[in-house]
Image: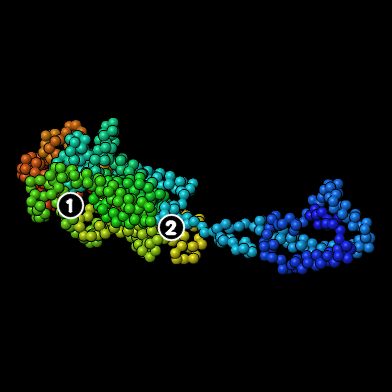
Amino acid sequence: MSDNPTPPRPAPEPAPAAAQDQSTRRDKQTRQDRQPPPDRQPQRDRQTPPDRQPQRDRQTPPDRQTSPDRQPPPDKNAAQGKNAAQGKNAARDRSATKDKGAAQDKSATKDGARQDRDARQDRSARQDRDAPRDKSAPRDKGAGPPARPPRRRRPRFSVERGWFPPLGSKGKVALVVSVLTGLLTHGYHLFRYPLYLTDEGIYMQRAWSVLRETSLSPYTYDYDHAPLGWITLAGWVFPLPKQFETFGNAINTGRFLMLLVHLVSVYLLFEITRRLSGSVLAATIAAFLFNVSPIAVYFQRQVLLDNLMILWLLLSLFMLLRREVTIRSVFGGGMALGIALITKENAIFFVPSFMYLLYRRVKGSASHRFTSTLWPFAAFAPIGAYVTYALLKNELLPSGFDFDLNNPPADHVSLLYTLWWQLNRSQGILFSHTGLLQTSWLVRDKYLLIAGVCAMLISLWLGMHDRKRNLGFLISGTLAFGYAFYLVRGSVVLDFYVTPLIPMLAINVGMVIDRMLTGSFASRFMRGAHSMTRVALPSFVALLLLASPASGYLVHTNTEGHTQIADQYQSKINLTAMQHAQIAWVRKHVPPNSRIIMDDDLWGELHDVRPFYPYAHSHWNASSDPDVRDKLFRKKWQNVDYIIMSNKMRKSMDTNNSDGRENWILQALRNSTRVWSQTQGNIKLEIYRVQ
């Protein structure tokens, strides 16, 4: 039996021995000539996998060889032909046996070489199957598996694409601590400090008018401010059980709303800072300054339109910093900005930064044209409602389209004329020795203001040099710069106008400190700082601010040189109690029908609590409103019965009397006698009876 596993073919008729021998040798030689050497096998034989080799080249493993008892039955015709050939010529059989042995030896040599080659191909195929393959890369024929290219890591942070790191457990703890800190610093001593101010009384007075008289003001509304701020106050007061007296008096009720507004603003500020910087540490620093800064505590406790405006501005910015810019977020962000604008017109100085952020967020998206149009439409909708209100009342344009500031319109008020007047009025220089920067702002918190301005400049430098990578720094820097420009432009500035700048400076300080601690732009030493250092250093600075009497954050040095708790947390200081005592004396000694000149901080007490004082009016309205000035007092000092003086009322009267409109009130003060007075520190309240 042959070693070749191919079944034998039927043998042809036996030929003569000589011819058969010659033919056998010639066939074997022909097969040998046609068989290429092992090292010159065709390329297709080398590339064909072992599992696809032709049947004749595949070698059966030894453990799978066919057993003798399973051999296929021999072919009868082949056996008969073989026996006949052997029986006819024994010599030929011996010669054929020799030739066959030689052929078998050659065939065994070739089969061994083929087996070695097939084994090498098997090992190569197994290695190819076991090795990982990159399906994306093309593979050349006959070449090994290509090297896998390094996988590109997705950026962890990008303001433009909305790739914000998750808040995480540590971030949630920091957020909760920040909100609780704001509740403590702004809630404690809320109704005692600071003193009730004129503007607080004005806004609560107009909220009273919305509820009681369904009008925007108890006097002639002259469009000095957009009305949504005190409409919000009226909406807050309406469902309360005692309305304006729920928390004691009208201003206290408004201050409790300011506390809630501050807590929501802390959350928004924390998330905005984290998304602009990608850092929880930056957000924590910003929230700390927003909560603890003395200048922030002083103004954010008061019932101011600026605090409501900050809430809507932060909400609008938060909507633009969502992970995905959707139609809902764009529309909500635009509406929030429009509400901020008709709460306080100063919000217009933040609009350029908002527009640029929207442009960068929707740039390259399929819906960028639609969203770029939807946002300004949503922002203009509240403004359009305000303009429509003035148009329906025929109070949009002045009479004869006359914008002469020296001759205000006499027949009716005008929205556009009032805006023109506000743009052109001026009141001193901010940087003078008597300006608010020296006398009010730096005295309360010089650290936040100085550090905030420096951080603003650094943010602008980083953002302008790499707008794609440092978009967050560019937005935070321009937000602070836009409003700072409004304050220093040279127009009239009141002390609480600095309020919207405080959160913007806090954001810049937090982001710049975090950038310096991570050391990603300057110092290799800081770049390698441990994460504990990034937390320990800001914590140490915070403790210094809280413990240093020079800062006034938690303790300060009083006029006697003693260190004590700061005024905003001092339980012994109860400034508003002086005003309560002033009101109590009026109710006890002044008849309800008396004609009274006062400040606006007492307006709600005298008009909403029995006994009512319907003829008690502020010096501003008594000198400017025609119904009060010409009909009730008739511009004669003899028609005044009492003058109730607040802390800075005399200074306000002198400032407002540039055209002599309050001369008759000042003359009544000169012809009066002081009947009550109370002083605490540099605060002095008085009551005069006119002779």
Q: Residue at x 84, y 64 (%)?
A: 24
Q: What colour scheme was applied to this rendering of the protein?
A: rainbow
Q: Nearer the viewer, mark 2 or mark 1?
A: 1
Query: Is 264 situated above or below 493?
Result: above
Q: Which quarter of the picture shows residue 671?
A: top left
Q: Considering depth in this image, is 600 or 235 the residue closer to the camera?
A: 235
What is the three-letter code of the residue carrying label 1?
Answer: Leu
Taking the spot 25% from the left edge, 52% from the top edge, the residue there is 346
Location of residue 674 in the rendering, given as x and y in whole percent from the top left corner: 14, 43
Question: Residue 677, percent across and down?
Answer: 19, 43
Q: Earlier in the sequence, mark 2 or mark 1?
A: 1
Residue sitting at 28 percent across and 47 percent down? 378
Q: Which mark is residue 370?
A: none
Choose between 133 and 208: the one closer to the eye.
Answer: 133
Residue 307 visible? The answer is no
Q: Quadrant of the C terminus?
A: top left
Q: Residues within 10 Å of mark 1 (few under 14, many from 20)?
A: some
Residue 339 relative to residue 668: left or right? right
Of residues 227 and 489, the one nearer the viewer is 227
Q: Amino acid at mark 2?
A: Asp
Instruction: Place residue 61 in its image quadrant.
Output: bottom right
Most foreground residue, 437 or 631: 631
Would you say 411 lies left or right of 432 here? left
Give left or right: position of 48 versus 623. right
Residue at which label 2 appears: 514
The relative height of residue 525 versus residue 222 in the rendered view (above or below) is below
Which residue position holds label 1? 419
Q: Residue 98: image x %, image y %?
A: 90, 64
Element class at badge 2: helix
How far apart marks 2 and 1 lie (CA) works out to: 41 Å
Tell me, yes or no, if residue 140 can be seen here: yes
**Could you classify mark 2 by the number of other residues whose Cα lies within 10 Å: few (under 14), some (14-19), or many (20 or more)?**
many
